Image: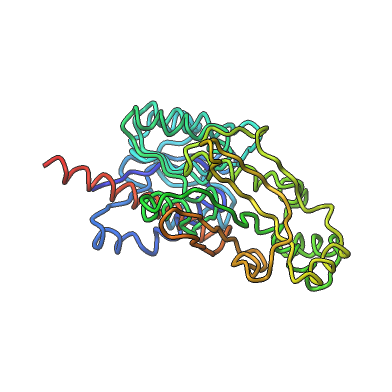
Amino acid sequence: MEYRLALIGFGVVGQGLVEILVNEKDSIKVLCDADLKVTAVSDIQKGSVYDPRGLDLNKILDLVKATGSIHDYPGGIKGWDSLKTIRNSNANVVIEVSVTNITTGEPALTHLRTAIEHRKHVVTTNKGPLSLACQELLNLAAKAGVELRFEGTVLSGTPAITLAMRDLAWAHITGLRGIVNGTCNYVLTEMDKGLSYDTALSQAQRLGYAEADPTADVEGLDSLAKILILANALLGGHLTRDQVLCEGISKITQQDVAEARAEGRRWKLIAAAKRRDDGSLEAYVRPEKIPLDDPLAVVAGVTNALTYETKYLDRITIMGPGAGKVATGYAVLHDILDIHRTLSEQRLGSR
């Protein structure tokens, strides 16, 4: 089966995906019977190009590396904006990896709605739209008969969402809790080694783990967006941001860390959601002193982890990278191939 991909956004994640495709495209075609062809790239800063026959991915990568743009790509149609690319290109899968906005979800939310309206499958790593309109987007996709995948919105390439939706579907997940922000976990790990909050945060910024303005991370807003996605997608909720308690790590002191250590505990920023006895959902993001025998207590540095509470398998913990160019690019590839798997199963079932 041929999948014609339109990349909306060509920053770190888009380039990570393309690098993987350069290495694996032929193997995927042979082993999975899936021909992945990038026919369009549209980026508000780097430019856009569309060729219905497929783009030369090596040339695209070389241009971005050399000039920071794709304006000089030889051939193809230039100058389409993101919405025209979604509407008018021959892509049957839209890869939405534009800049994240966790306040309004835009422009990615409009990108996703437009792709679904035009009956194109969607893969996104953009947590903005999914944190604000998860059930709406899932319902729109189902009504349009297209697939929507968003594995990379929470734990990057670590398959937390697919594990829950596929492999744990009949284990019946009743709740989940985890570490979903690498910046906060790195800072708390370094504070546990003796550094002050300010020193640990500065070190994280110097290493590229934290932004120049780290507010979204350290005040828990990034974790809030992710727990909303998990709660609404995996537990069938309709939670909104104002229904979730959110507290970050900026008030934790070295004295707090020392007291936790004396108690045989360790501070972690925990994002959690669970179903109450009456069937409603509750969720929160807050620092917690957790015992050292908790699986989440050993998660160090920028690593992320999630523990699922289930009806039949008790607790299951998954751990892995929560960010990174290649890891998040892999999440996109994983989702494309999961769409291929689903469509192949549907085709076989209709025979």
Res 182 quadrant in image: bottom right
Q: Is residue 47 visible?
A: no
Position of the C terminus by quadrant: top left
Res 58 quadrant in image: bottom left
Depth check: 68 or 300 in front? 300
Q: Position of residue 342 (x, y in %)?
A: 28, 46
Q: Who's the residue at 53% across and 40% down the image?
A: 277
Above or below: residue 318 compared with residue 104: below
Tell me if 2 is positioned left or right of 324 in this view.
left
Q: Position of residue 10 (x, y in %)?
A: 53, 47
Above or below: residue 70 compared with residue 266: above
Above or below: residue 253 compared with residue 37: below
Q: Please, which residue is most extreme toward the front here?
A: 277
Q: Is residue 30 visible?
A: yes
What's the colour scheme? Answer: rainbow
Q: Position of residue 52 (x, y in %)?
A: 32, 40
Depth check: 330 or 255 in front? 255
